[in-house]
Amino acid sequence: MLESFQIIISLLDSTIRIATPLIFCAMAGIFSERSGIIDIGLEGKMLLSAFVAATATFLTGSPIFGLFAAILMSCSASLIHGFACITNKGDQVISGLAINILASGLTITLGIALFSRGGQTPPLASEQRFMPIDFPFLDQLSFVPVFGELFVEVISGHNILVYLSVLAVFFTYYVIFKTRFGLRLRAVGEKPEAVDTAGISVIKMRYQSILIAGMLCGLAGAYLSIAHGAGFGREMSAGKGYIALAAMIFGKWNPIPTLFACLLFGFLEALGVRLEGVELIWIGEVPVQVMQALPYVLTVVLLAGFIGKARAPGAIGVPYSKEG
Amino acid sequence: MSDSNIIPKWLSVGVIPLMNLFLAFCVSGLFIFFIGENPFRAIFVMIKGAFYYPGAIGYTLYYTTNFIFTGLAVALAFHARLFNIGGEGQAYVGGLGVGLVCLIFDQHVVGFLVTILAILGSVIFGAIWGIIPGYLQAKRGSHIVITTIMFNFIAAALMVYLLVNVIIEPGQMSPETRDFASGVGLVQIHILAKYLGLEMAMSPLNLSFIVALIVSVGFWFLVWRTKFGYEVRSLGHSETAAIYAGIKVSSTIIIVMAISGGLAGLVAINELLGVHNKLLLGFTAGYGFTGIAVALMGRNHPVGIFLASLLFGALYQGGTELDFEFSSITREMVLLIQGLIILFSGALAYMLNPLMERIYIKYYGNYNNA
């Protein structure tokens, strides 16, 4: 009994670690897509900012500087996306795909040119990273049964970006549903003509939304290379941007359900790693690939309307042109 | 957005795409320059690597073959205004078709027949991986872009599982099947040339290239010379018009995705029947994604797709040469160039239109009123 409790605790702990970049990216996706801009480029933006975060931190020694460099990089990628599909009315999927492929090539090429380490950045020392924060009163709380352990192992002891990701969810919820800016943002994604008639610039609204998305992706990238990891490795985003996209759809473009989708997908991955080589009663060994494929399968099933309908914003993917 | 009708066609279909390509190469050159190498030397090395060395052209055409298949796959879907990002997964699962046919039959049936069946296997398995997203789009309204992305990942997981646990050669460490029997496979062109008394440098170029050319002609005929092709293009222009014209939209979507997936699946015959002679992990190596760039550059026409495939074939083969000649640029540079081409030829395809229109009107007046 005690042992299985320990297993659950450690599973929840790794769930949170895995889910953090997904949460940032999925919130970024919500901002972008709620304003009508498809964002396939989450993956590439995260990869680019992970590289820039590690590089800037290595060169300056300051993770704070690395974090801002990452956000700047990710926002620049957002601006390219915006220039292509808002200003020039290009295809949003193609533009996002271009950013992803560009990110793969650029990070490896620059990494090799700068550091000659096969695309990796040099490892960062612990003072150059965002390290785990221990909450106060840990010693006293650890004696409390169940809750104490949960607090010490699961809630406490993560780096600052993990806590920021939770804040990002509430930020997203608040901005999108409780502010005038959010109301306009949703309107731009559903019926841009209406917003235009009200004298608000659709172009400006959409640029603002994708810039916020850029900032959030920057945080995800920085988490990968200077908080969770200690340096950049090639292709280190490893499809997380696409899982985040799936989580956003799974959460039906709503921040709170999306948070739970991210946690679910994170939990599935943690469970998959945990179950590797373990014989389960009745089922036998569950291949790790089943767990890897499950988020995608679930998203396909959901999108097909078998578990409630996921409806995308009305004007998504359509460039806005004024009449006449 | 579509091609401008203010300027003549040779400008909008000929000059502007070339200018977009030129821009993509300029930006790539800037990156090489910032890294501290000479961009012109890099181009020279790549051209030499792609065409000059013995066997280089063979390698270039071998890559070209893959890109023709995936480019046509993406292009057919584009004609119906469907965006099939799933070429990578469809090619991968197509490989499963080849692998299964060969592993089951190659000990009992003559090689020639097994090869034919294996080609069919690649098409059918690729088609299945295209039909499911097609069905979900047509009947359940799931967005094809998202579904095909998801199916790429599902294919990857499926293939790793099968190769690691099920069809791996017993006693083998790396996830590969056993070699197919010796009579199975598509013969390489340099071996064929030897039979004809010609001396050719060794390269992986094989009969799949011929298949690709035949399929290209078939593609042209299907899209521009058949009733089905007409329906596909009508659907691509306007779904409402297609419905009023009595075209069955959902079955057209499903058939288009089946053919598209089958075309992508053919990558497996070039890779597995032509070169590796077994099924192995990750043989698709991003060819499915490159197909998107190829279709965009080739403007969804087989001739354009052939030229774009040739360009990408040369980039891939020339890119490997970068590894040997430079210490600071590697073949990943090609990914960067590919990303820039997708950006300029795809997402920013119409960026130059207003500028060209202004210049044209200034000097020649309006083309349509003339």
Image (cartoon, rainbow, N blue to C red):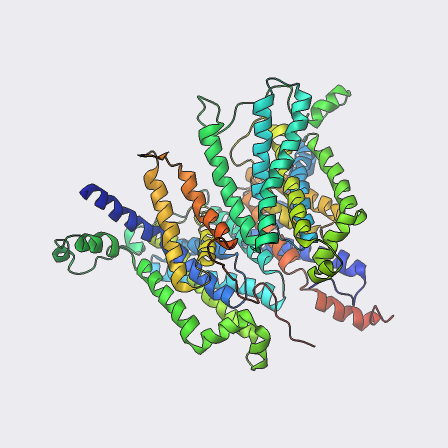
Q: Can you see residue B312?
A: no
Q: Quadrant of residue B318?
A: top right
Tell me: residue B76, above or below residue A178.
Answer: above
Q: How many marks?
A: 0
Tell me: residue B261, above or below residue A259.
Answer: above
What residue lies at 67% left-to-right and 39% top-to-bottom?
Answer: B64
What residue lies at 45% left-to-right and 31% top-to-bottom?
Answer: B164
Left-right relation of A119 to B62: left
Q: Position of residue B343 (x, y in %)?
A: 61, 57
Q: Position of residue A314 (x, y in %)?
A: 56, 67
Left-right relation of B90 to A138: right
Q: Position of residue B295 (x, y in %)?
A: 67, 49
Q: Nearer the viewer, residue A110 or A5?
A: A5
- Hey, which residue is sitting farthest bottom in the picture? A199
What residue lies at 46% left-to-right and 22% top-to-bottom?
Answer: B170
Q: Can you see residue B302?
A: yes
Which of the image's four quarters has the N terminus of chain A? top left
Which of the image's four quarters has the C terminus of chain A? bottom right
What residue lies at 79% left-to-right and 65% top-to-bottom?
Answer: B7
- Hey, which residue is sitting farthest right in the picture? B370
Q: Quadrant of residue A26?
A: bottom left
Tell me: residue A19, above or below residue A311.
Answer: above
Q: Position of residue A123 (x, y in %)?
A: 35, 47
